[in-house]
Image (cartoon, rainbow, N blue to C red):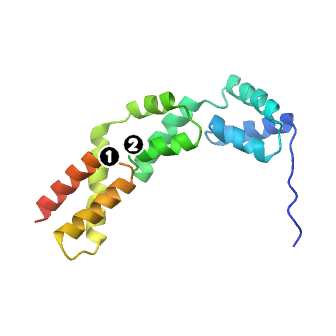
């Protein structure tokens, strides 16, 4: 097997590639910078390419954050903590993250958590109600919901189960 040769791109090639990628799916500025780093674009030129992409509206972190929040809530059932952490890892500014999360409906988030926990309750094996409560709490927290919301929801589910 031949060794993989690292291909480098010029700033113009990186701009064209990123324009194509951003036209197909939302990209964050952090995504663009990471890609340019792997392509071997010089650090000073990365910022120039990023400014051009932002100026031409190919990349918009607030638009990306809103889309990310909407998708993770709807399709993955994530909570605010997990979404916030994932967006921070993507290099999105904290103010942009909070603005995107403010547009969410906390009531529908609670309903999604209840539905996920009910589904989990049907598949989990447990010997005592205490064990069930612990497993549901861990699962709810792993989805990224805050402790109080998970605790209240689990208490309601276990109370109605008894």
Between disc 2 and disc 1, the foreground one is 1
Instruction: Determine the secondary structure under disc 2.
Output: helix
Question: In the image, 50: left or right of 88?
Answer: right
Q: Which quadrant holds the C terminus? A: bottom left
Q: Which residue is mark 2?
A: 80
Q: Nearer the viewer, residue 58 or 147?
A: 147
Q: Is residue 63 visible?
A: yes
Q: Name the side, left or right, on which 60 lies relative to 10.
A: left
* In the depicted structure, whether residue 77 falls above or below residue 67: below
Q: Quadrant of residue 58?
A: top right
Q: In this rendering, is residue 32 above or below 7?
A: above
Location of residue 129 by image quarter: bottom left
Image point (58%, 42%), residue name: 90
Count of residue discs: 2
Measured from the top left, where is residue 121 in percent x and y? 26, 66
Of helix, strand and loop, which one carries label 1? loop
Residue 146 is labelled as 1
Vertical comparison of 1 with 141: above or below: below
Residue plotted at (30% across, 42% down): 108
Residue 103 seen in render: no
The numbered disc on residue 67 is none
Which comes before the other along the chain, label 2 or label 1?
2
Q: Kindly check if marks 2 and 1 are in contact, taking CB atoms under 8 A apart as contact.
A: yes
């Amino acid at each position: 097997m031949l060794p993989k040769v690292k291909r480098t791109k010029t700033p113009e090639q990186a701009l064209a590639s990123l324009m194509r990628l951003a036209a197909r799916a939302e990209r964050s500025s952090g995504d663009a910078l990471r890609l340019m780093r792997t392509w071997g674009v010089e650090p000073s030129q990365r910022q120039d390419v990023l400014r051009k992409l932002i100026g031409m509206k190919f990349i918009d972190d607030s638009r990306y954050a809103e889309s990310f929040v909407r998708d993770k809530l709807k399709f993955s059932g994530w909570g605010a903590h997990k979404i916030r952490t994932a967006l921070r890892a993507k290099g999105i500014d904290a103010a942009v993250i909070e603005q995107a999360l403010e547009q969410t409906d906390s009531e529908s988030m609670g309903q999604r958590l209840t539905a996920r926990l009910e589904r989990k309750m049907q598949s989990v094996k447990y010997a005592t109600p205490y064990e069930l409560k612990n497993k549901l709490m861990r699962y709810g927290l792993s989805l990224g919901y805050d402790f109080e919301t998970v605790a209240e929801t689990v208490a309601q589910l276990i109370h109605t189960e008894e």
